[in-house]
Amino acid sequence: MKPILLISFLFFPVFFAVVNAQWILDPDNPMPVCEAEGLESEITVFGDENDGIYVFWLDSRNTAGTGSSEIYGQHYNSSGYAQWETDGRLIVSHYNRIFDYTIQRFDDGTMIAGWASKSDGYTYSDSLHVRKLDDDGLAVWANDLLIANAGFEPNAILSVGEMQFVKDDFSYCMAFYITYYGGSGGVHMSRFDESGSLLSPPDGVQVAGPGGVGHAGLLPAFDLNNNVYLFYSGGNGAGAPLNCVKLNTSGGVVWGPENVIDGTTGLAYQFDAISDPDGITFVWEGSGNNTDLFTCRFNADGTQGWNGNVFPISDVEGQQTIFDLHKSGNYYFITWSDGRPGVDPGNYDIYAQIFGMDGNMMWADDGIPVMSFNTYIPHPKMGVTPDNSLVIAHQSTVAGYTAQKVM
């Protein structure tokens, strides 16, 4: 039976005074977004400026066995009514296959779509394009912008993929992952302007690698020079470093790369960061017999923050993993799956913690319990309300769609 793309919302009084009838609030009866033939996957959701939402996904309805070759989307207004065609609007079409895509919306309301696609006779994703979208999901530029192309010459690029964007006062900044001939990996950076003109060399500027580069993140530095932070794992194995480099608009190094977790057991798997005008704060799963959660900070000038201290968010026995990190005001909010001794009836509970800009934990050591139910490994997600309460939700294997508000 074909999977159907569905959407379900859980509303809280803190967010809405009135809930209009079109939204379906029953998690056992979600509202269909797309029931077209083929498969829908890789869903992206974000809000608009009027309390509505955009939903995008990869779609294979028109594909003859080559995988997802198109990007579709839907726009809902604040009352939950679809604004585009039934089963979604075609956003991007490629004659063969789209391996990966990203669509981001920025504070000024602009949207950028990027995708890695495959040509005939080529095994990997061999080209990377971007397109500016208007509020209706339509192309703004006359032509899509080619960012990078695979080929032995001039940059020995075997494939392109995983991408993300930052917008600043200078331009759009894009970081994307490269696999080179020989199998090593790296990250390239490109910039382009509002009109769709490429400001960087073709294929971008190499800013990490080659070799020893895993997952990467890109964040603005919020400074007058429009610098950015690139942070990335220095490999895929346990104990890998977490490197950070500050880059200028040309991809030149302002400082770094620095292993920001030097002196620790290194990475286990997940890591994340949040930047602000004064620096960048990191959170990661530490490697070892137990997977614990830690945080540290680097100042905007590349020196260590918090007097060089690494603070444990939770280093109790058992596994602490799969975290979701947010910031509101002067506080960081984090929730995670926790397998500390005594968990019952399932294998993992959900815990949470708040810590300040100085790294000090605000709640009990090792966090506070939020939910306990019979499930295998929960994947909690969190929202922060205007009064800095946490709303944590999880779709468990038994308990259904579960949510908890933490004051």
Image (cartoon, grey):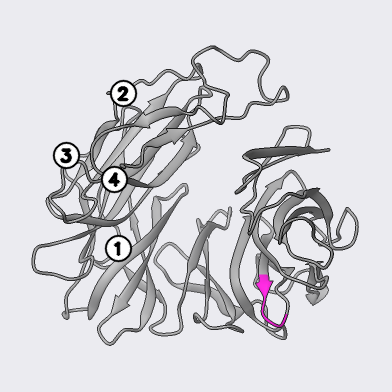
Mark 3 vs mark 1, CA separation in Å = 20 Å
Say which element carries label 1. loop
Q: Are marks 4 and 2 in contact (CB under 8 Å)?
A: no
284 left or right of 123 in image: right
Which residue bears the numbered disc 4?
39
Q: Are marks 3 and 2 in contact (CB under 8 Å)?
A: no
Specify the quadrant of the image occupied by residue 298: bottom right
Residue depicted at 67% across the width and 61% down the height:
279
One can see residue 105 in this view: no
Query: In front of the other: label 3 or label 1?
Result: 3
Say which element carries label 4. loop
Mark drawn on residue 142 = 3
Q: Which badge, 4 or 2, is on the more N-terminal residue?
A: 4
- Three-letter code for the amino acid on which mark 3 is drawn: Ala
Is 286 part of what is drawn in magenta?
yes
Quarter of the image for the N terminus: give it. top left
Q: Which badge, 1 or 4, is on the more N-terminal residue?
A: 4
Which residue bears the numbered disc 1?
200
Mark 4 vs mark 2, CA separation in Å = 19 Å
Q: Position of residue 265 (x, y in %)?
A: 69, 84
Mark 1 vs mark 4, CA separation in Å = 36 Å
Quarter of the image for the C terminus: give it. top right
